[in-house]
Image (cartoon, grey):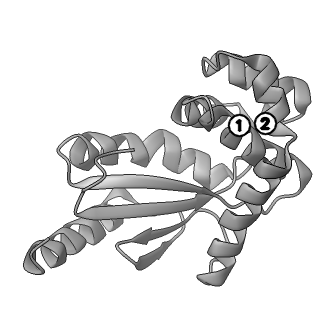
């Protein structure tokens, strides 16, 4: 989400069953979007980091499948809505979230959800997170600087402002 040439890139590694990830998605992320994404300073990239078992894996594949139809962020919002986690991420629930996200082709969504490509994409994100030393969700990289946990807005503001100044200082 955001401009491809944004001077600051925040990569989030998260699990749809993670309560703190949901809190970040509902409370902090919208503020970051309004303050930094909308003015072109920040691009947010999201990586699946399912660490809570089978339903986390399934939700991660579902988000990837929704993304194949251009509805990742809408699926993300539906899956992190207040009370969504408590309903679980079984097969019927994932289909309902896809509908809520406006996924146009439910048949293709179901095929993509259960595909080897989905499993490989999720595994790639997961291995990237472990390779960076992430052990919990949410974990973030802001222009390469790690930030662990659902920190208060001020923590993200400080990290983004510092990254922006460093990028501008490097002629980016």
Kindly indicate the quadrant of the structure image that contains residue 76. Answer: top right
Residue 9, position in %: x, y?
A: 35, 62
Q: Which element carries disc 2, helix, strand or loop?
A: helix
| Residue nearest the viewer, comparing 108 with 74 | 108
What is the spatial separation of the Cα atoms under label 2 and label 1, in whole angstroms? Answer: 5 Å
Residue 39, position in %: x, y?
A: 17, 44
Q: Which element carries disc 1, helix, strand or loop?
A: helix
Residue 68 vs 99, above or below: the answer is below
What residue lies at 76% left-to-right and 64% top-to-bottom? Answer: 123
How many discs mark residues in the rendered view?
Answer: 2
Residues at discs 2 and 1 in contact (Cβ within 8 Å): yes
Kindly indicate the quadrant of the structure image that contains residue 108. Answer: top right
Residue 151 vs 94, above or below: the answer is below
Q: Position of 86 compared to 22: left or right?
A: right
**Mark number displayed over residue 112:** 2
Kindly indicate the quadrant of the structure image that contains residue 127. Answer: bottom right
Q: Position of 102 compared to 94: left or right?
A: left
What residue lies at 26% left-to-right and 39% top-to-bottom? Answer: 34
Q: Position of 92 compared to 24: left or right?
A: right
Residue 92 makes an appearance in the image? yes
**Mark number displayed over residue 65:** 1
Residue 144 vs 40, above or below: the answer is below
Q: Crowdedness of circle 2 by 10 Å Cα count: few (<14), some, many (20+)?
A: many
Residue 141, position in %: x, y?
A: 45, 71
Earlier sequence position, callout 2 versus callout 1 = 1
**Mark number displayed over residue 46:** none
| Residue nearest the viewer, comparing 117 with 128 | 117
Residue 104, position in %: x, y?
A: 65, 15
What residue lies at 34% left-to-right and 73% top-to-bottom? Answer: 143
What residue lies at 88% left-to-right and 57% top-to-bottom? Answer: 53
């Amino acid at each position: 989400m955001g401009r491809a040439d944004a001077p600051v890139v925040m990569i989030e590694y998260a699990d749809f069953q993670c309560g703190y990830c949901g809190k970040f998605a509902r409370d902090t992320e919208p503020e970051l979007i309004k303050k930094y994404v909308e003015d072109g300073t920040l691009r947010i990239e999201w990586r699946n980091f399912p660490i809570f078992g089978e339903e986390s894996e399934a939700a991660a594949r579902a988000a990837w499948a929704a993304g194949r139809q251009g509805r990742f962020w809408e699926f993300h919002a539906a899956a992190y809505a207040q009370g969504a986690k408590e309903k679980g991420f079984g097969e019927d629930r994932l289909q309902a979230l896809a509908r809520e996200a406006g996924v146009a082709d439910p048949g293709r969504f179901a095929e993509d959800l259960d595909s080897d490509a989905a499993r490989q994409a999720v595994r790639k994100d997961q291995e990237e997170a472990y390779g960076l030393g992430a052990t919990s969700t949410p974990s973030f990289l802001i222009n390469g600087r790690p930030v662990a946990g659902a920190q208060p807005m001020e923590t993200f503001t400080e990290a983004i402002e510092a990254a922006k100044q460093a990028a501008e200082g490097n002629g980016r």
